[in-house]
Amino acid sequence: MIRILLVDDHPVVRMGLRGMLDAEPDLTVIGEASSGVEGVALALSERPDIVLMDLRMPGGDGVEAIGKILSTTTEVRVMVLTTYESDRDILRAIEAGAAGYLLKDASPAELADAVRAASRGDTVLAPSVASTLVRQVRQPAPPSLSARETEVLRLVAAGLTNADIGKRLFISEATVKTHLLRAFNKLDVADRTAAVTTAMHHGLL
């Protein structure tokens, strides 16, 4: 029997979930919580096999609750069950250790199968959520600059010439040019203005 804890601030939602899950011969709901704080306390005291966690609730959000549960025990698997599927929500939940991310429009059969899969150790994702994660993985990592390259670009942005930058940093003008060329290469640009603009776009300045 797979023991499940429901964490959702809407009583009607919890009632519907309990009815669907308890109707399955191998699933049973052993408790309900209406907030993240309450969910953490029940998860740690009752040690269910699966926690179905909503994301946005009073008293701390679901992602915070996931982190607190999983920092204390590895026995409990936490699955997100929510109406929200923004990139930020998905990434935060997965990074916190969620074993799955389902949307509330899932059918009873899909939900039951997902709970069973999670209890076996599988990661279960709604199709739209999986697509979001694949898209994030495929995006190239943002460029990174060394401390000195960043310093040089900041001075470029302030309007200093290479000679002025060299004097400010006590390095030769040739060394300034070397740092700039390395920054150009990392940022995939060809001139000072584009380097500054691109670095700002990526939050590097």
Image (cartoon, grey):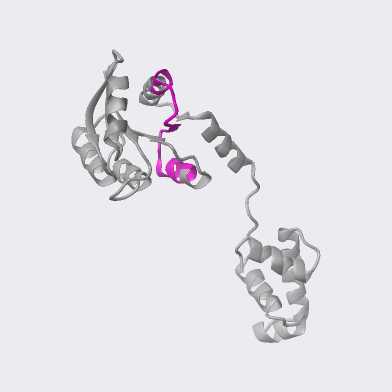
Which of the two residues, 123 or 183, is positioned nearer the viewer here? Answer: 123
| Image height of 108 relative to 127, above or below | above
Residue at image point 40% right, 44% down: 96
Tell me where residue 110 appears, x and y as whole percent.
Answer: 43, 21
Return the residue nearer the eye: 172 or 6.
6
Residue drawn at (27%, 19%) of the image: 22
Extreme right residue here? 190
The quadrant of the image that shows the C terminus is bottom right
Q: Position of residue 16 (x, y in %)?
A: 31, 26
> Quadrant location of residue 118?
top left
Closer to the camera, 165 or 191? Answer: 191
- 80 shown above or below 16: below
Quarter residue 198 falls in:
bottom right
Q: Is residue 167 left or right of residue 107?
A: right
- Residue depicted at 74% across the width and 81% down the height: 172
Is 139 rendered above or below residue 196?
Answer: above
Q: Which residues are magenta?
A: 90-111
Q: Is residue 76 left or right of residue 100?
A: left
Was residue 95 drawn as part of the magenta stretch in this picture?
yes
Query: Is residue 179 inside the magenta stretch?
Result: no
Q: Residue furthest top?
A: 25
Q: What x and y, as percent, mark residue 108?
A: 39, 20
| Residue 19 sits in quarter | top left
* Residue 24, above or below 77: above
For the N terminus, the image quarter is top left
Residue displayed at 29% across by 16% down: 23
Labels in figure, total: 0
Q: Point out the residue furthest to the left here.
A: 45
